Image: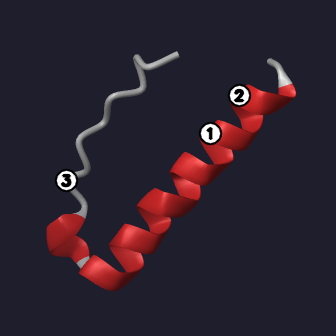
């Protein structure tokens, strides 16, 4: 895996955790579209 992909994945994970932390369990249904790369 290239470094750029790892950075993008890390940012994605952080964004999801951020959303869950501030949106509560009702906002866990994140539209998972990892087919961008």
Pick the residue in front: 36 or 22: 36
Task: Where is residue 36? Give x, y as percent.
Answer: 43, 20
Residue at (40% x, 17% y) in the render: 35
Residue behind mark 1: 9
Question: Badge 1 local density, few (<14 within 10 Å), some, or many (20+)?
Answer: few
Residue at (46% x, 72% y) in the render: 18
Q: Is residue 14 left or right of residue 29?
A: right
- Residue 9 appears in which quarter of the rendering? top right
Task: Where is residue 28? Give x, y as percent.
Answer: 25, 61
Q: Is residue 29 above or below residue 25?
A: above
Q: Is residue 7 left or right of residue 13?
A: right
Q: Residue furthest left?
A: 26
Element type at mark 2 = helix
Give whichever of discs 3 and 2 has the lower sequence position.
2
Whether the residues at callouts 1 and 2 have beta carbons within 8 Å, the answer is: yes
Q: Is residue 12 above or below residue 9?
A: below
Task: Where is residue 13? Give x, y as percent.
Answer: 55, 52
Residue at (61% x, 52% y) in the render: 11
Residue behind mark 3: 29
Q: Is residue 22 left or right of residue 3?
A: left
Q: Is residue 6 above or below residue 27?
A: above
Viewer-nearest of discs 3 and 2: 2
The disc at residue 20 is none
Question: Badge 2 local density, few (<14 within 10 Å), some, or many (20+)?
Answer: few
Give whichever of discs 3 and 1 has the lower sequence position.
1
Task: Where is residue 23? Give x, y as percent.
Answer: 26, 79
The disc at residue 5 is 2
């Amino acid at each position: 895996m290239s470094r750029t992909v790892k950075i993008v994945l890390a940012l994605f994970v952080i964004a999801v955790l951020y959303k869950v932390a501030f949106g509560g369990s009702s906002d866990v249904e994140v539209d998972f579209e990892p087919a961008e790369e």
